[in-house]
Image (cartoon, rainbow, N blue to C red):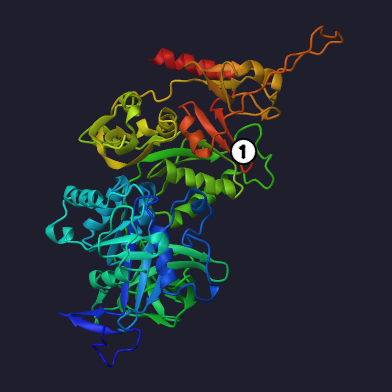
């Protein structure tokens, strides 16, 4: 690139485009994709080629997945940004590329929407074998609505089961299905193996690594040619949009902003335009810009820059930092409505407070939920009839389960209710969310999957047989029909099936759904589980606890093999006598218990059950612990029906 304005500062190269100015030394791009298609791995490779690691040498893979939960689950949960200083191979001027790594799961769609407000174009990553999947549709729909230029990257072209041409055709069909216009469909295609840091503009053979390139230079070139530089009006006053929040032990709350117009400097007094319409003068105590893997202090930033500012303790996402003399607030960030809710409250079980250092009071739990609202725009917290419990609404089960898991790791003790759907009144009718479900599975499981989804009021939209022994099905299913479906699905397909779903629309209430056929084994007294009692109970169903586990009345210790609940004495001990047995006792073995994760426990719950979450354990229990009260409640429900 050439320097069009000889008087411009090195970091503020400009070129006129009509009445607007262009920052030709800067590009802002988001990488969007379905879960596990290689977004974070590609960002790693781009950082490595741009020399962002520097003296640090080789670092841990997936460096952008900084949360423990992100590394454990292998998914991106929070949108994060990094900046690389790219020097083109042709010797033209260096360009700063700000890269936003967005989540691929629709449950974290609020992060995707915020990420897209910071950029001028997107890189759409698609797996060379799996092709476009539901979350690909979700994130692409957002980008098309924002009228952003798109670069398609077919990743993992070296997979043995790669089918590159078919995946490209499927992607074109997806664009057409999402009503993309001719300009949007005319996108460049890059073929990549992100793990090896290789990209090419020439389509390789299926399962082969591109041979005409040894690095990501083709991707960088296409990126500079396709993604437009930031535009701005030289006469406009300062406008910086707050798109995310962070925290520093030294600087306090940090507001992550994209500068839209004007310049902002350290020590400058600006107008803080709040969500309620008021404004207040504040001073920027510190200004940071991301370079590679580090945030570095900066004196000033201009249009298009992505920055972090300190000095405003109560600033919120969606607010604007504007010129102190001429404040012009930007529109607030809007996200999709929540579809799933669950009740989160204090732990009310007899074992409350046993975990060392646990946070158990209602005030502590409410304060933590309020803090989550600051940085999570897709979450809502509503009061309930109980003063120690709140209804928390989010995009999906996973997003809410991640919140509960984070609170658990921070030593909170909670009671979490069964996930429910958030309904809407449309034209006087109660409507519920419907999900588009995509399933890949061996064709011999077609009958079992169809039967499972038929009982959950699902409608098959499409069935494709790849001719490889695998089939792909698309269904429209009520969101509440998918609560607890994953476990049954994996059981029926013997762990081989793959499923993904994304919100589709609202439809009239589907009626009653019975998604769990088996009842629960419920402890009828407090005590310690014994091997003797468990030996007799394991014939009745599947146990969830081990011998010597402390239990209490109303705690669910297993799954009944029949449809009704059964109160059991799991603490029963063998009576000892001074009579010697004429024959040695036969040695019997206990079947290992089924250990449920937090997500599995939430899936297992029925309406009258909830999950007790502590730093040390996850237990399932009845909402009413006393079996007499439960029997009365059951009788009242039957009488009402």
Q: Which residue is mark 1?
A: 617
Q: Is residue 303 above or below residue 460?
A: below
Q: Residue furthest bottom?
A: 7
Quarter of the picture containing the N terminus is: bottom left
Whether residue 118 is visible, yes or no, is no
Q: Tell me: 478 left or right of 532.
A: left
Q: Is residue 146 above or below residue 507?
A: below
Q: Residue at x 30, y 81 (%)?
A: 90
Give percent across and percent down for residue 586.
73, 14
Whether residue 444 is visible, yes or no, is yes
Q: In front: 323, or 377?
A: 377
Give percent across and percent down for residue 208.
33, 56
Q: Quadrant of residue 236?
A: bottom left
Q: In front: 120, or 395?
A: 120
Q: Residues within 10 Å of mark 1 (few under 14, many from 20)?
A: few
Q: Residue at x 53, y 38 (%)?
A: 597
Q: Residue furthest left?
A: 182
Q: Quadrant of residue 156?
A: bottom left
Give percent across and percent down for residue 228.
24, 71
Q: Quadrant of residue 467?
A: top left
Quarter of the picture containing the C terminus is: top left
Q: In front: 188, or 516?
A: 188
Helix, strand or loop at label 1? It is loop
Q: Is residue 582 above or below residue 11?
A: above
Give percent across and percent down for residue 404.
51, 44
């Amino acid at each position: 690139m050439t320097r069009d304005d000889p008087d411009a500062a090195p970091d503020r190269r400009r070129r006129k485009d009509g009445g607007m100015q262009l920052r030709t030394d800067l590009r802002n791009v988001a990488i969007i994709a379905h879960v596990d298609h290689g977004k974070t791995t590609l960002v790693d490779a781009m950082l490595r080629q741009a020399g962002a690691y520097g003296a640090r040498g080789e670092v841990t893979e997936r460096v952008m997945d900084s949360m423990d939960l992100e590394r454990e689950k292998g998914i991106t949960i929070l949108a994060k940004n990094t900046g690389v200083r790219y020097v083109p191979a042709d010797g033209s001027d260096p360009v700063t590329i700000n890269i936003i790594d967005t989540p691929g799961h629709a449950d974290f769609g609020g992060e995707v929407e915020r990420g897209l407000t910071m950029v001028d174009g997107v890189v759409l990553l698609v797996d060379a074998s799996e092709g476009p999947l539901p979350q690909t549709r979700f994130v692409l729909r957002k980008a098309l609505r924002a009228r952003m230029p798109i670069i398609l990257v077919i990743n993992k072209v070296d997979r043995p089961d790669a089918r590159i041409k078919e995946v490209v055709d499927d992607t074109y069909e997806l664009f057409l299905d999402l009503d993309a216009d001719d300009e949007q469909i005319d996108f460049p295609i890059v073929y990549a193996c992100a793990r090896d840091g290789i990209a090419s503009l020439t389509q390789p053979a299926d399962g082969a690594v591109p041979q005409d390139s040894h690095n990501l230079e083709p991707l960088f070139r296409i990126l500079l040619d396709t993604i437009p530089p930031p535009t701005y009006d030289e006469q406009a006053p300062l406008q910086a949009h707050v798109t995310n929040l962070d925290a520093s032990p030294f600087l306090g709350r940090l507001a992550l902003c994209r500068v839209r117009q004007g310049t902002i400097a350290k020590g400058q007094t600006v107008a803080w335009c709040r969500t309620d319409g008021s404004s207040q003068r504040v001073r920027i105590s510190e200004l940071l810009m991301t370079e590679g893997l580090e945030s570095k202090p900066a004196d000033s930033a201009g249009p298009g820059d992505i920055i972090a500012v300190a000095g405003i303790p109560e600033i919120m996402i969606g607010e604007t930092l504007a010129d102190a003399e001429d404040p012009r607030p930007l529109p607030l960030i809007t996200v999709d409505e929540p579809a799933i809710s669950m009740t989160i409250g204090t732990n009310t079980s007899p074992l409350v407070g046993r975990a060392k250092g646990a946070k158990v009071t209602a005030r502590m739990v409410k304060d933590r939920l309020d803090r989550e609202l600051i940085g999570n725009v897709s979450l809502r917290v509503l009061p309930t009839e109980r003063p120690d419990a709140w209804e928390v609404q989010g995009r999906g089960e996973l997003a809410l389960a991640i919140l509960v898991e984070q609170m658990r790791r921070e030593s909170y003790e909670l009671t979490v209710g069964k996930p429910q759907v958030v309904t809407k009144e449309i034209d006087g009718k109660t409507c519920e969310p419907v999900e588009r479900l995509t399933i890949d599975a061996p064709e011999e499981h077609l009958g079992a999957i169809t039967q499972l989804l038929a009982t959950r009021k699902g409608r098959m939209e499409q069935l494709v047989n790849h001719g490889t022994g695998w089939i792909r099905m698309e269904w429209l299913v009520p969101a509440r029909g998918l609560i607890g479906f994953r476990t049954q699905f994996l059981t029926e397909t013997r762990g081989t099936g793959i499923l993904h779903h994304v919100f589709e629309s609202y439809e009239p209430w589907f009626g009653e759904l019975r998604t769990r056929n088996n009842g629960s084994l419920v402890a009828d007294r407090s005590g310690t589980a014994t091997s003797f009692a468990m030996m007799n109970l394991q014939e009745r169903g599947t146990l969830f606890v081990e011998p010597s586990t402390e239990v209490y009345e109303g705690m669910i210790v297993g799954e009944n093999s029949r449809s009704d609940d059964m109160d059991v004495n799991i603490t029963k001990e063998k009576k000892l006598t001074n009579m010697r047995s004429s024959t040695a006792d036969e040695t019997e073995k206990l079947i290992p218990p089924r250990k449920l994760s937090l997500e599995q426990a939430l899936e297992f719950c029925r309406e009258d059950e909830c999950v007790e979450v502590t730093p040390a354990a996850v237990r399932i229990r009845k909402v009413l612990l006393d079996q007499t009260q439960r029997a009365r409640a059951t009788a009242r429900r039957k009488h009402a029906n």
